[in-house]
Image (tube, rainbow, N blue to C red):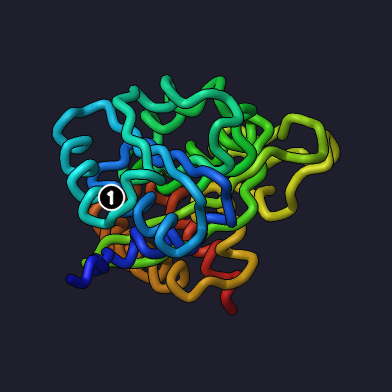
Amino acid sequence: MDKQIQLPKRIQKIVDLIPPSSCIADIGCDHAYVPIEAVRQGKAQHAIACDVRTGPLQHAEEHILFAGLAGKIEIRCSDGLERVHAGEADTVVMAGMGGPLMERLLLGRLDDFPHFVLSPQSEIPHFRHFLLDQGMKIEEETMLVEDGKYYVILNVSKNQEGHTSTACAPGSERDGQEALQDAAYMREEDFLYGGRLLQRKDPVLKAFLKKEKQRYEEILTKTDAAEIRAAYAYCVSALEVFQ
């Protein structure tokens, strides 16, 4: 029997972005598609599939058994990283949850693991600020669209410069004189839309920005609110990168 599962594009991209690892920890594993494919494809030798809910863990166990990987993927009932020890995994994967929840789960644990693959579903600009404020480096960002919804995936590691980033508060500029900062995250547009995506002129981001520009223009026909005008200005500024 063919045990290969047709993965959603977003899940496959997350697997693609996992670096070679001895062990990965998938937090909020749901059906365990990510650890199954990571082990199957040789991205990880072993995996820990964690979820705080018993239902998803039961589904995960069924899929792991079906894939014949029960000896390589361990299931744990865990609230976030609570039951994953420091250094136990090379790469931590979190996806399918809101940015604020992800921040809560990561706070105090970012020094415990060398690499993270993260895909927050909300409050993404604030999440980028959070990562840099915690002394992390956003190595890469990937954007994709699936079923009409845009997703962002971040590859994150500890900033090896040995200093904490001085990321600005939302709506302000970062002071380039204060630290050896990442040039990809200097302006508020970089936090709103992804500095790495803007750096490489990502075509998916370009399409997203065009839609956002049109949406703001429609809103501005009905209101002249300062926050909408400011958001529109940031969107236009980001689009100028692609010219």
Quick one: 108 or 44, which is closer to the camera? 44
Q: Quadrant of the N terminus?
A: bottom left
Q: Is residue 218 above or below residue 22?
A: below
What amino acid is at disc 1? Thr
Q: Quadrant of residue 164?
A: top right
Q: Residue at x 43, y 59 (%)?
A: 15
Coordinates of residue 181 in the picture (x, y in percent): 77, 43
Coordinates of residue 56 in the picture (x, y in percent): 19, 38
Q: Residue at x 64, y 39 (%)?
A: 114
Q: Residue at x 56, y 63 (%)?
A: 197
Provide the residue designation for mark 1. Answer: 223
Coordinates of residue 201 in the picture (x, y in percent): 58, 72
Q: Residue at x 46, y 54 (%)?
A: 153
In the displayed orientation, state which residue is furthest to the left: 55
Tell me the SS state at disc 1.
Answer: loop
Coordinates of residue 122 in the picture (x, y in percent): 35, 42
Question: For this view, does 25 lie left or right of residue 243?
Answer: left
